[in-house]
Image: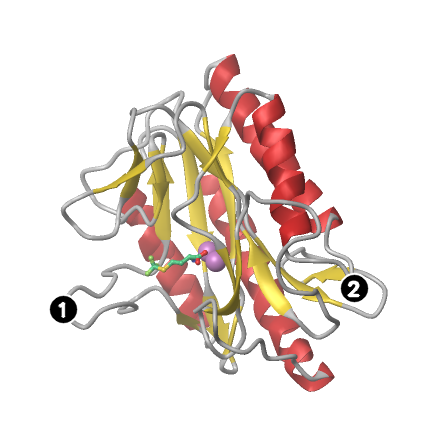
Amino acid sequence: MGSERITLLSSREIDKMRKAGQLAAELLDHLAPMVKPGVSTLEINDEAERWTQAKRAKSAPLGYGPKNNPFPKSICTSVNEVICHGIPNAQQILQDGDIINIDVTPILDGYHGDTSRTFLVGTPSPEAKKLVEVTEECLRRGIAAVKPGGKIGDIGAAIQEYAESHGYSVVRDFVGHGVSHIFHTAPQIPHYGTKGKGKRIKPGMVFTIEPMINQGTWEAVMLDDGWTAITADGKLSAQFEHTIAVTKDGVEILTLRD
Ligand code: MF3
Ligand code: CO
Ligand code: CO
């Protein structure tokens, strides 16, 4: 992945990414009111799949990954200590005080819109709320660090500096990624790093920034299902994600609804 060439998208392709991105943002807005104590993560998944089909789009996660263990559902639902890639499940009922990341990636006209947010279920602890707020600000700062002519390392440096200043840690095992007609491609976007390091950021690059920020250690453990990543110490993890396009003079957030 790291050695692959980075494709610059044409304005026609970025237009398709914009439409897919808008759909992805709309899907999260549609699911948001379902996030309540008593709802199962499978119910959220099934509504996402139904809505996506009604929009003549496809759910990229469904069947994604290795042939012997493809991702079995349409969205990722990552609750509390789950860092990412949680699998929706009928037995998992949201409880008051939980936090849940919902990560959606509809494919529209062949192009992927990849975005996620962490939602509060009922009234979480002040500590949980703070983690979620800081993580959203990490994404905002990561995006603000994207400048044509700058370096990929600028993004992770901005995120890491802010997260660690609050006593949190940045997940290493999962990174942002180039996205287009391909779900995951070059470049990799680490959410930690050093300003001025890494490849040069150029207009036409399209990639995600999706910091996963932990209360405790950054270390992750993979569950037996081969997908669900949890924090090694069982403490909370939060995540926000946008798909962005680098423009001549800055950045366009493709998964922000206009
Ligand atoms: N949407 C996730 C990302 O941000 C990827 C999910 S892949 C899946 O990159 F197979 F787990 F769904
Ligand atoms: Co995603
Ligand atoms: Co992504």
> Dot 1: few (<14), some (14–19), or many (≥20) neighbours within 10 Å?
few
Picture quadrant where residue 7 is located: bottom right
SS for tag 2?
loop
**Residue behind label 2 places its C-beta within 8 angstroms of ligand 3:** no
The answer to whether one can see residue 35 in this image is no
The correct choice, above or below, for 168 with respect to 211 in the image is: above
Find disc 2 in the rendering and name its residue: 149
Q: Which circle marks residue 193 in the picture?
A: none
SS for tag 1?
loop
Task: Give the foreground label among 2 and 1.
Answer: 2
Quadrant that contains the C terminus: bottom right
Q: Residue at x 39, y 68 (%)?
A: 60
In the image, residue 227 lies at what x, y percent? Answer: 25, 52
User: 168 or 151: nearer the eye?
Assistant: 151
Quadrant that contains the N terminus: bottom left
Contact between marks 2 and 1 (CB within 8 A): the answer is: no
Q: Residue at x 57, y 27 (%)?
A: 164
Q: Which circle marks residue 68 in the picture?
A: 1
**Residue behind label 1 places its C-beta within 8 angstroms of ligand 1:** no
The correct choice, above or below, for 244 with respect to 107 in the image is: above
> Dot 2: few (<14), some (14–19), or many (≥20) neighbours within 10 Å?
some
In the image, residue 233 lies at what x, y percent? Answer: 30, 24
Q: How many marks can you see?
A: 2
Q: Residue at x 52, y 25 (%)?
A: 131
Q: Please identify the residue farthest to the right as the structure is shown.
A: 249
Q: Residue type at mark 2?
A: Gly
Q: Is residue 128 left or right of residue 194?
A: left
